[in-house]
Every structure is written in structure tokens, then in C-alpha cells.
Amino acid sequence: MVAEPIVGALHENLLTALGTAIVSGEYAPGHVLNLEGVSAAHGVSRSVAREAIRVLESMGMLASRRRVGITIQPPEKWNVFDPRLIRWRLESGDRAAQLASLSELRRGFEPAAAALAARRADPHQCRILAAAVSDMVMHGRSGDLEAYLLADKVFHQTLLEASGNEMFRALNGVVAEVLAGRTHHGMMPETPNPEAIELHDEVARAIRLRDEAAAERAMRAIIDEAAAAVSGGLD
């Protein structure tokens, strides 16, 4: 009964260690690993090493070939939408480029999702959006950034779900990692910007009032504000 959580933790630790090493360039494209070497270097069983390697293969970061070994793949083959990869890249020296790329991606879909939510959101989703904004106000005033982050995640997750578009909904993990990365890497002020909170309130209000243009405009302003804040934090 105790073994499963331990094995799970070993798997996650190894996955993070290997993923971070690949993202940081410690393991460069073309570098070849082998199962025995990974197992010995990290003090885990072959089965744990094999499972971590399978996950990284599914993310396009590794490729196993008979008589060649396990080869590190170039970045253009990686699944850049995988939240784990986003997290690892934000933890590496590639943070500025990753955040710029993510901001551009968010500009491409979140305003459109907000407009669709203004057309399709149900009353329950409208209430969740309003409650999330209230929580952001409260936690923003107290300076509880982790609680603020949770409310912010709920807001954006609900908005993407309310869009009624399965493709937008599937990008929730991407947005969540952007929000978490900003908080966990010191790019949030001790007291969140009241203007940013007000913009979230504008989005929620526009969705409730079925004002697609206003929802789209306010969401675009949220992303622009966040991008400017992150850029300032990296200067």
C-alpha cells in the first residue's frame, strides 16, 4: 500500500530531472542515453526509468531506436503545448522567450474565447466568474499570492470552458502554467495590480451581459497588462 506513492514520486522526480536537463541544454539534441545509465545515475529501478522515458517520448523530447539508444530530440519536435514542458522551460534560462511566446499565443485565443463565452456561458459559469473576481479582490488586498493565483486559474479555466469550444478548453493547462509561472518566478507584485483585477471584472460583466465585443476587448487588455508586467519583471 505504501509502495505506489513512493514509485509515483520517484517517477515524477525523474521525469522532472530529465525534462529540465533536456530543456536547459544539459542534454543537447543528439545526445544518447541508455536505460541502465538513467537508472544508475538517478538511483531508480529500470521500470521507473522506462516509464519516465516513455512519457518524454510522448512529448517528442526523446526518441528510442534499436541499436542507437534513447536520443535527445531538437526543440522543434517537442510538444510545446504540454504544461509540463512549459513549466520546465519557465524554470530554465529560456524564461523570457517562453513567456513572450506564450503571451502571443494567449492573444490569439483568449480574447476569442471570451467573446464566445459572452455568447454561450450559462448562469452557473457566470456566477463562478463573478466569485473568482471577488476572491481576486480579497486576496489581492491581503497579498496572499497563492490564493490569488488559485482564483485567477479558476477564472480563466471557467472562461475557456464557457466558450463552448473544445480546442480552447484543452488549452487550460497552458494558461494555468503561465499564471503559475508568473507567480512562482517573482514576476507578480506583492499586491496585484488593481487595474488587472478590474479588467477581470469587466470580462465577467461583459459575459454576463452577453456583450461579445466588450468581453473580447477586456480580455485582450488583461493579456497586454500581464505581458507588460512580465516584461518589466525581466528587465
Image (cartoon, rainbow, N blue to C red):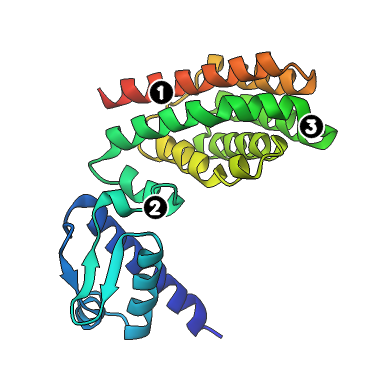
The residue depicted at 19 percent of the width and 79 percent of the height is 37
- Look at label 3 and name its amino acid: Arg
| For the residues bearing labels 2 and 1, Cβ distance under 8 angstroms | no
**What residue is shown with label 2?**
79
Q: Is residue 35 visible?
A: yes
The residue depicted at 54 percent of the width and 19 percent of the height is 220
Q: Residues within 10 Å of mark 3 (few under 14, many from 20)?
A: few
Q: Residues within 10 Å of mark 1 (few under 14, many from 20)?
A: some
Which residue lies most toward the front here? 66
- CA separation, marks 2 and 1? 23 Å
Q: Nearer the viewer, residue 130 or 125?
A: 125
Based on the displayed image, in which of its 4 quarters is residue 166 positioned? top right
**What residue is shown with label 1?**
227
Q: Nearer the viewer, residue 158 or 28?
A: 28
Which type of secondary structure does the marked residue at label 2 adopt? loop
Position of 187 compared to 213: left or right? left
**What residue is shown with label 3?**
127
